[in-house]
């Protein structure tokens, strides 16, 4: 619950960009999860910083999300303010073959921008759903290519909302599906990406290839959060789950996808508890069969059951 003074302070800073008691199922791609005490969609970095300052001064927890494509919120909901950054959507070309993108810019927006201008280098990420903030924070990627290969700089607001810094690539600690080293609660507000010049049709063709490969191998027409587990060194989580005979396994409305074993799909009416039970079953069965303990890639948030 948010105290009255904190609520008023949030309303003062965010106006109608803040709402209270909102279901997170509407804001995460798995379409499950309980209510957040409050959610806000700041329209500018200044509004975001204002919201962070209110949280800091009122002792309110904050959680940053892009579009929730890699996030599972428990049925019990989530304390404090959830900041959805989809509103930070500036995208521009900068001198020296660079793109500056606000944290809320989507991959599809970047892909269109690159195709229109014949910018090459980011095609590998075509079809990864979500925002620039999520891409950077997760070091999202596919195969051997990740965000870290194309990020030149990021702009970060401190958890208290008082400090804004530009951090060069050399000072960033990217790991497999993670960016380490930022203070907890820091918010990425924009990123600078390096691109090359290429023939527009060549970029378009490369993007089409990537999208077609996804459509062939991933269940894209059903709610999911993409890969549930990280790939263990030298192997694939999907292969281990399939080898353990778990494709199609169902708990309530959640199912290990028959298309891609590292995806859990919400077949309709799933709860977060269904998804979490399936995660635990898959983890235990894979460990029993292969000795490998899988680690989740999906970020699990919210109050404990
Ligand atoms: C069908 C499907 C396919 C997918 N394919 C891939 C794939 O090929 N490769 C891959 O890597 N992922 C994949 N994913 C997962 C997901 O798309 C990526 O992780 C993506 O980068 C998440 O972006 P988001 O904005 O939705 O992040 P969210 O889910 O909103 O957030 C993810 C994490 O990033 C943090 N975060 C988000 N924005 C910020 C910010 N501005 N500042 C600080 N922290 C922030 C959040 O706190 C959270 O910890 C897939 C998901 C789906 C549903």
Image: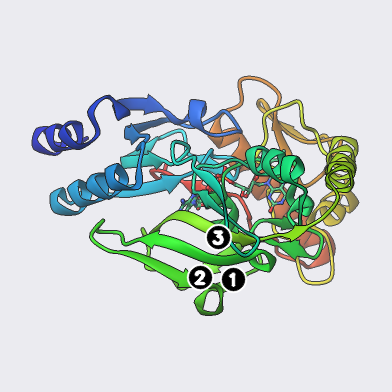
SS at mark 1 in the image: strand
Which residue sits at x=77%, y=57%? 197
Report the front residue among 34 and 49.
49
- Horizontal and vertical percent for residue 144? 80, 65
Task: Say which mark, if any, is on residue 174.
Answer: 1
Residue 215: image x %, image y %?
86, 35
Q: CA distance from mark 2 to mark 1?
A: 6 Å
Q: Which mark is residue 133?
A: none
Q: Which residue is tagged 3?
A: 192
Cα distance between the residues tagged 1 and 3: 15 Å
User: What's the CA distance linking mark 3 and mark 2?
Assistant: 18 Å
Q: Residue furthest left?
A: 5
Callout 2–callout 1 Cβ contact below 8 Å: yes
Q: Which residue is mark 2?
A: 180
Label 2 residue SS: strand
Mark before the other along the chain sequence, 1 or 3: 1
Classify 10 Å Cα crowding around label 2: few (below 14), some (14-19), many (20 and above): some
Q: Which image quarter is the N terminus in? A: top left
Q: Residue furthest bottom?
A: 170
Colour theme: rainbow
Q: Is residue 37 above or below residue 99?
A: above
């Amino acid at each position: 619950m948010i105290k009255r003074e904190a609520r008023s302070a949030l309303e003062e800073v965010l106006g109608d960009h803040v709402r209270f008691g909102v279901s997170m199922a509407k804001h995460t791609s798995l379409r499950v999860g309980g209510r957040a005490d409050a959610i806000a969609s700041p329209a500018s970095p200044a509004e975001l910083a204002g919201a962070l300052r209110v949280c800091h001064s009122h002792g309110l927890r904050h959680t940053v999300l892009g579009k929730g494509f890699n996030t599972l919120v428990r049925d019990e909901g989530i304390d404090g303010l959830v900041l959805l950054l989809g509103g930070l959507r500036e995208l521009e070309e900068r001198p020296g073959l660079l793109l500056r993108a606000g944290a809320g810019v989507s991959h599809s927006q970047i892909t269109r921008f690159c195709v229109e201008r014949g910018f090459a280098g980011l095609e590998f990420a075509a079809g990864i759903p979500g925002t620039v903030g999520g891409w950077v924070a997760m070091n999202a990627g596919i195969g051997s290519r990740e965000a870290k290969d194309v990020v030149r700089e990021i702009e970060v607001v401190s958890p208290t909302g008082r400090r804004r810094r530009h951090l060069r690539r050399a000072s960033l600690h990217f790991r497999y599906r993670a960016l380490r080293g930022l203070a907890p609660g820091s918010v990425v507000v924009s990123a600078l990406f390096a691109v090359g010049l290429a023939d527009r049709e060549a970029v378009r063709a490369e993007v089409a290839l990537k999208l077609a490969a996804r459509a062939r191998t991933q269940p894209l027409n059903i709610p999911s959060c993409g890969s549930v587990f990280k790939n263990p060194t030298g192997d694939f989580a999907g292969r281990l789950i399939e080898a353990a005979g778990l494709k199609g396994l169902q708990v309530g409305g959640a199912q290990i996808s028959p298309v891609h074993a590292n995806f859990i799909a919400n077949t309709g009416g799933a709860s977060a508890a269904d998804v979490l039970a399936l995660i635990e079953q898959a983890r235990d069965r894979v460990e029993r069969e292969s000795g490998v303990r899988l680690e989740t890639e999906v970020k699990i948030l919210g109050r404990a059951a």
